[in-house]
Amino acid sequence: MNNAPPDADARRAARPVVCYPPDHLPAPDAVWTARLRAGLMPRETVTVPPREARCLRIPAGHILRITCIEGPQVGDLNLWNAADLSERFYSGKTRALHGTHLTTGHRLWSAFPHLRPMATILHDSLDWYGFDADGAGVHDVIGTRCDPYTDTLLNGGPYHHCCHSNLVRALAAETGLPPDRAEPHVHDVFNVFMCTGFTRDTHRYFTKASPVRPGDSIELFAEIDLLAALSACPWGDCASNSTDTAVCHPLRMDCLAPDQAALAEWQPPPPNGYDRSHGL
Ligand SMILES: [Zn+2]
């Protein structure tokens, strides 16, 4: 390791600057959110079996509710524009805009060249958790998803019921795409109910047992027509990093319709305004 320069302390003392101040991203109006959530009507329900994934389509103006139903379980969520799979959830930019963990009022943004809100979190029953003494929070956008490539690299063999492969199979079944054409559409996830952080000493990604319990839920308002895929992760509640031995539970996805009067003044977000000229 190199010796620190004489002015190392001064360099380290530079003031942190929040890249994207939160006042540039106003949260949805609380009164409007309450009106939207009053009297939700069920449209469709899908149960995601343990160590599997399932898809559900959520029309714009509807709500995706993900519920823990039998026991602590985390889920790996992918979102696409239902009419254009190239517009998909952008975990990295969402993290940069809102932080490492999402809760009520935060938005899930789509990838370039679209970059617009795909969904807005209206309700999070785990919003009380905050950040704990380990620096961990719930619902992260820092993890990627468990996958067979990393298994092969680190553990010597693939585990086929990992979230990546679960999402590939679910998307292939939903769209009719062959698996090799479905796979490139699977992307870094929104880790629903997962409790994660970075270790204090080396800033390595860690998980701990999720605080989610049956009855807990998170609700996402669809800003555009969405295709959602959710994997019930083989790590279960992520208390350990086993796959075959972890206790796993199903998750439920509901598509819910709000009172149409509450949507009277809502407009779907337009495509991003950048003209893609890139200075040319
Ligand atoms: Zn997983």
Image (spheres, rainbow, N blue to C red):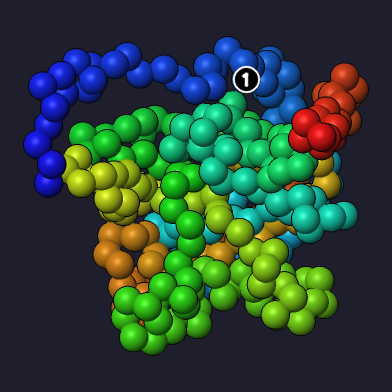
Q: Is residue 110 visible?
A: yes
Q: Which image quadrant is residue 183 in?
A: bottom right
User: In screen coordinates, is 253 left or right of 246?
Assistant: right
User: In screen coordinates, is 266 left or right of 113?
Assistant: right
Residue at point 84%, 55% (across, down): 84
Tell me where residue 104 appears, x and y as whole percent.
55, 29
Q: Which image quadrant is residue 45 in?
A: bottom right
Residue at point 48%, 62% (across, down): 145
Q: Is mark 1 within 8 Å of ligand 1?
A: no
Q: Which image quadrant is residue 229 in?
A: bottom right
Q: Look at the image and tell me in which quarter the C terminus lies.
A: top right
Nearer to the camera, 145 or 266: 145
Looking at the picture, which amino acid does disc 1 mark?
Answer: Leu
Question: Which residue lies under the disc numbered 1?
Answer: 25
Residue at point 23%, 20% (across, down): 11
User: In screen coordinates, is 16 left or right of 183?
Assistant: left
Tell me where residue 70 appears, x and y as whole percent.
46, 61
Tell me where residue 209 appears, x and y as whole percent.
30, 54
Residue at point 34%, 86% (across, down): 156
Callout 1: helix, strand or loop? Answer: loop
* Vertical side of 163 occupied by 199: above or below: above
* Vertical side of 14 occupied by 173: above or below: below
Tell me where residue 65 appears, x and y as whole percent.
64, 46
Nearer to the camera, 132 or 37: 132
Q: Mark 1: few, some, or many residues within 10 Å (few <14, many ≥20)? A: few
* Vertical side of 129 occupied by 234: above or below: below
Q: Is residue 250 visible?
A: no
Nearer to the camera, 210 or 169: 169
* Vertical side of 217 occupied by 239: above or below: below
Farthest residue, direction bottom: 157
